[in-house]
Image (cartoon, rainbow, N blue to C red):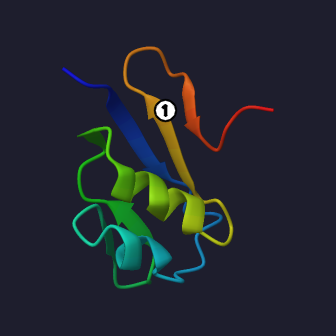
Amino acid sequence: MGDRWQVEVDRSLCIGSAQCLHHAPDGFRLDAARQSHPTDPETDANEKVLEAAESCPVEAIVITLLGSGEAVFPPED
């Protein structure tokens, strides 16, 4: 079995660019205020969700390993 991720969107940073929907349309949705939300906060590791996080212009998407909390994105310095 592969890694499981915790996906969060920092709505104080989210600007509603919808880049996350472009890269992972099944992984995110926008609410009425154009704020992004993960469709499933606990998900199997997958490239599309990672691409969505990497494409976010304000790095509002945070991915950690479920259980350990180890950073997946953004990477720790």
Which amino acid type is marked by label 1? Thr
Residue projecting furthest to the right: 77
Label total for image? 1
Which quadrant of the figure contains the C terminus? Answer: top right
| Front-lying residue, 53 or 10 | 53
Q: Quadrant of residue 37?
A: bottom left
Classify 16 as above or below 57.
Answer: below
Classify 73 as above or below 35.
Answer: above
Crowdedness near tag 1: few (<14), some (14–19) or many (≥20) residues, C-alpha within 10 Å: many
Locate residue 15 relative to residue 53 in the image: left or right: right
Locate residue 67 relative to residue 15 in the image: left or right: left
**At which x and y percent is residue 52?**
46, 63
Q: Residue at x 46, y 14 (%)?
A: 68
Locate residue 11 relative to residue 38 in the image: left or right: right
Q: Secondary structure at mark 1?
A: strand
Q: Residue at x 44, y 83 (%)?
A: 34
Residue projecting furthest to the top: 68
Q: Quadrant of residue 41?
A: top left
Disc 1 marks which residue? 64
Q: Residue at x 32, y 38 (%)?
A: 45
Locate residue 50 relative to residue 55 in the image: left or right: left
Classify 21 as above or below 68.
Answer: below
**At which x and y percent is residue 20?**
43, 70
| Front-lying residue, 50 or 35 | 50
**At which x and y percent is residue 17?**
54, 83
Q: Residue at x 34, y 77 (%)?
A: 31
Which quadrant of the figure contains the N terminus? Answer: top left
